Amino acid sequence: MAATAPSSIQTPTQSISPSEGFGHHGVEINDAKVRAVVERPENHQAADEFLDALDQIDPSVPRSDDLTMALATALSATNDTAWKAEQFAQQSLKFEFQASILSGKDQIDFLPATLSLIIALLHHGRICCLLLEGILISLRKSQLALAQTDEAASTDQTRLVEAMACHNFLTEYLWEETDAEMADVARLVAKVSRNIEAGAAVSAFDLFLIGAYAPLHDVDAVRNWVRELGRRNLSALDPTLRLLVFDRFLEDETEIEAITPVTSHISKEVQSQYEENPYPRWRRMPSFTEFEEVEAYVAAGTGQRKRRATSNPQRAKVLIAGAGTGAHPISVAQTLPHAAVLAIDLSRASLAYATREAKVRGATNVAFAQADILKLSDVDVEFDLIESVGVLHHMEDPEAGLQALLKVLKPGGYLRLALYSKAARHAVNAARNYYSADKYAPGLIGIRAFRRDLIHTDDPALAPIQTIPDFFAASEFRDLVMHVQEHQFTLPQIDEMLKRNGLKFLGFSSPSARAALRKMPAKMAQRRERDLRAWDKYEQRNPDTFIRMYDFFCMKR
């Protein structure tokens, strides 16, 4: 089966001068029925109503052009509501391509509306479907073959490879390619480099096609050219070139304060893993509600009423222990605008990404610093709230990490933790047991090879791993099944650990847990919501409840 672009796409090749940027290609929307959503993106009610309505639509039914364009528009949302459109779009495209394959066609013809939806999905989402991934890999290969000829690429083909470049940059080039393809890419790199150095026009199609296969930042001529363009006039720089190339300069030049040393052997190994690439390179922020007080924020997080108000919102100090690339601490800083937020992480690369994003988003009440949780007692500060999400389970001794956090948490202060559930990680554990570090090469080659083996195995215990979004991005895949250190917990273990360390469990903030409580009779839910032993019985019957993590608040007595 060959994936091809529609024959109707035949407009002249775009080109740009090395002294200029070029315009960002958006998705054109012409459908009057969705114009309210498209033309008034600030109308959150209209957008939410459209996204909620997707639950009532069968994705296996052929889409109208109206629905396709509305989905493409919804995908460009900058908050996390876009995941509904992302999920529906992939399901719908999967059914569309399956129908084409079952019809016995040797190739897939992409209708203009379908191509627009694919471009929007690549630009703003993540392909989390192996069928779509395979078709798009084939489609990318066909574009590379075109680049080796004298045939002109169309505007839509340029938009397509630009979107592929964005997607594959954000997923760290997990898609596989042949040696022959990379030889063709090398010839394309040489051609683009010669044109830049000669001051000749540079084909946008060629440039982004390179970026669809490998980092543009690694091409010397492109890197130097884009740096000069950005230094000259950053506001005029093409947004995709800024994302793929120029922002890397800003991150490299960002100064990150180190407030503690990193001394633990495991901490250094984990640090090394996360320094390779700051990830995830997120582009959407969660929606948030502002709170003046930490107590109100915690109460909302656990679905309870605020019981007390003792902290001064102007003085509240918040620590995010495990800042990653900043989505979490920036969200907390915006949710608690009166608080002073300190976000720490082992990885300087991740903190640089987070710092740049915080500036872009105007989060002025968050500061980033490099630090080891185990050395926090060296910092003479006490915090009203500490959040450590998905961090302690990667430490050599998670409880030692917890105790280090408690040393800098005020009495009566709040602690939010998120830890892996042993029950929910059954598919992950099957994959981790299948992995051997001696069998696979380090880096992307080993990641691709292990992932390929998981895709082609006939072991049913491994099949569920392919439904997890982290399976579709290189660093997240490594984090999921190849991490150098991982602990998993049961709820009785967490219950005992909290009691040993003088912590009172306040409730889960996991959406799945909140949803489970809503389905229970009110009295039963009220009785069980703070009882970890009762939750353990529930999880035994529903082992995927905490598929992401146990995410909960507690209080230091």
Image (cartoon, rainbow, N blue to C red):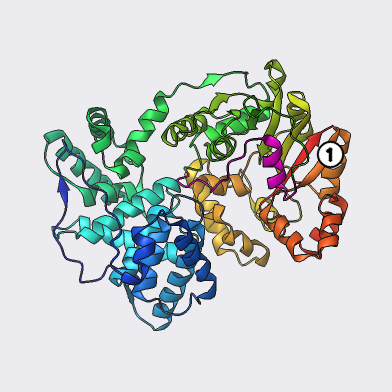
Position of residue 268 measured from the top left corner of the image (x, y, whole percent): 62, 27
Q: Does residue 136 show up?
A: no
Main secondary structure found in the magenta portion: loop
Residue at left 24%, top 55%? Answer: 158
Task: Using the image, determine if residue 173 lies above or below residue 515.
Answer: above
Label 1: state its secondary structure.
Answer: strand
Task: Using the image, determine if residue 259 lies above or below residue 542.
Answer: above
Position of residue 19 measured from the top left corner of the image (x, y, whole percent): 16, 35
The quadrant where residue 178 appears: bottom left
Quarter that holds the N terminus: bottom left
Q: Which residues are magenta?
A: 282-305
- Residue type pointed to by label 1: Lys
Position of residue 189 measured from the top left corner of the image (x, y, whole percent): 24, 43
Report whether 371 appears left or right of 52: right
Q: Of residues 394 and 49, which is closer to you in this image?
A: 49
Residue at left 41%, top 35%? Answer: 360
Does the magenta segment cover residue 397? no
Report whether 225 appears left or right of 447: left
Give the class, few, some or many, for how many residues have Cα within 10 Å of label 1's Cα (few <14, many ≥20).
some
Task: Using the image, determine if residue 262 lies above or below residue 190.
Answer: above
The quadrant where residue 539 appears: bottom right
The residue pinned by badge 1 equals 504
Residue at left 83%, top 56%? Answer: 526
Q: Of residues 312 and 520, which is closer to you in this image?
A: 312
Task: Using the image, determine if residue 276 lies above or below residue 66.
Answer: above
Q: Of residues 347 and 447, which is closer to you in this image?
A: 347
Position of residue 284 measured from the top left corner of the image (x, y, whole percent): 47, 47
Q: Does residue 245 show up?
A: yes
